[in-house]
Image (cartoon, rainbow, N blue to C red):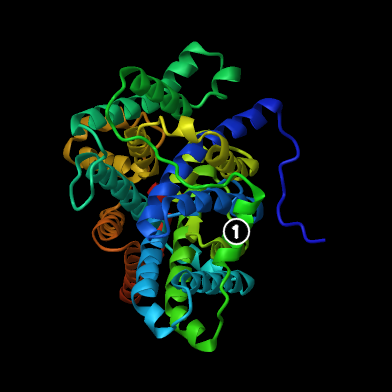
Amino acid sequence: MIVFFHMKSHFTQGELLQNIIAGLTVSFVALSLGAAFGILSGRGAFIGMLSAALIPIITSTFGGTRVQCSGPTGPMTTVTAVMVAVAHDQLVNRFPGVSPDHLVNITLFLTAALLVLAGIFRLGKFVTYVPNVVVSGFMNGIAIIIWLDQMKQLFGISGKDAFEGPVLVNIAVASLSVTLVFILPVLLKKWIPPSYGRLLSGTLLTIIVMTVISTALQLPIEHVSLQGSLKSWSDITNIFQSQWPTHWSLSILLTTLPFAVQLAVLGYLDTLLTSLVIDKMRKEKTKQNKELIAQGLSAAAMGAIGGIPGAQATIRSVLIIKEHATLRIAGILVGVFALIEMILLQDAINLIPQAVFSGILLKVGYDVFDWTPLRLYAKEFIRDWHQLLHNVLSRHDDEAVFVTNREALFIAGTTLVTVLWDLNIAVGAFTALFYLLNMILMRKNPMRDLKPITETEGMRDEP
């Protein structure tokens, strides 16, 4: 018998409750993001939420990252939206009688096959060649994108529609939310014994408190909106029956293959780069090939229901760790709770202001940002220009730790290209530049003890 996953066998009731709360907290964020990505993809908010529920159940059960949360992501949804548009506007004329939705679903099945094959042929190891300075820049770029996206949403700029209601009220709600997310955990540690305080989630409490305040004051702002039906077994079977492709041909497969390759490559990078971030935070090691197979299984499931393909999601994975998840079951429960919320708690979820999630995501961006290299580089800069501070700084344990100018340039460059252009290009280009630069330096000085840039004292956390 093949054992797909190993569940930690020894844990306390408190630890289990802590993971249940973490899953519950992240499920609200996953559901909200799923709705947004569903609308962006062109497949609908309900399908987006259903995808956000099913993907973490599959990937957390079978995946190679022990504590994580997968789901629809911005990059994957963007490519899916292009595929949906092409299928409805162009391919429907090329393949008359074939449903455009079915063409998209065939693309997702091909994507699933490519990801599974990548795992079977053990291609996951190649992501470890991405230098740590590039991973750091990737983290920073994702953080800045999160911040910018929330600012665009709150202010209604750069082509995005602002949340409904007065802009200043939404900004106030988001500001208070991010403030509470920062200070509530501190207050909980101060006022509540550690054995109980760690079971309470600052994020979940923020959602509850802000929902109560918004409802009590009857604030005229936009709230979460759940639409769709998933109340009986017939609803589930109808989804499968309507979305399963009925026309398969070599011509269709060849036409959709380029989109599948793009989604598979993006899913590979999106997932395994996020796994490097999670590994760095948890000091664990992802089984990359197992993770790729799990992501492939989730993509196949999305093809069966007409959903949105996903990847290991940076925002949700970081959030679930920050909510003190330690067991694999936490990620599974994100999906389980999301399904329950879709079915039973629609009215209650509809009371949550959208701006609350903006505040939470601003805090998530803070958690994603890799502050250590910036702090070390700033300390070195101060040390160079203000020698009088040397005695003060030398009291710290990391006095000898530093980030070189070259490392800082790699981090900054990866960050800027990620934000201004494309994540995949940023990672690929700066990884290639990293090794090219090392080759040039080796040729110039054959006796040089060539350390990868990631192995300097300031960047010890190798992927």
Residue type at mark 1: give it: Asn
Q: Secondary structure at mark 1?
A: helix
- Quadrant the N terminus occupies: bottom right
What residue occupies the far bottom of the structure in this picture?
A: 251
What residue occupies the far right of the structure in this picture?
A: 1
Q: Residue at x 46, y 39 (%)?
A: 319
- Residue 359 point in image, percent of width and height: 33, 34
- From the viewer's perspective, is residue 296 above or below residue 246? above
- Residue 214 point in image, percent of width and height: 34, 23
- From the viewer's perspective, is residue 104 above or below residue 204? below
- Residue 50 point in image, percent of width and height: 52, 51
Residue 215 vs residue 55, the one in the foreground: 215
Q: Residue at x 56, y 65 (%)?
A: 242
**Residue picked out by circle 1:** 238
Residue 308 vs residue 232, the one in the foreground: 232
- Residue 16 point in image, percent of width and height: 66, 32
Residue 168 vs residue 148, the one in the foreground: 168
State left or right for residue 447 relative to residue 159: right
Dividing the picture into quarters, in which one does residue 392 lie?
top left
What residue occupies the far top of the structure in this picture?
A: 191
Q: How many marks?
A: 1
Task: Say if residue 448 shows up in the picture.
Answer: no
State left or right for residue 305 relative to residue 368: right
Task: Say if residue 304 shows up in the picture.
Answer: yes
Dividing the picture into quarters, in which one does residue 303 lie?
bottom right
Determine crowd level at label 1: few under 14, some 14-19, many 20+ residues with C-alpha closer than 10 A.
few
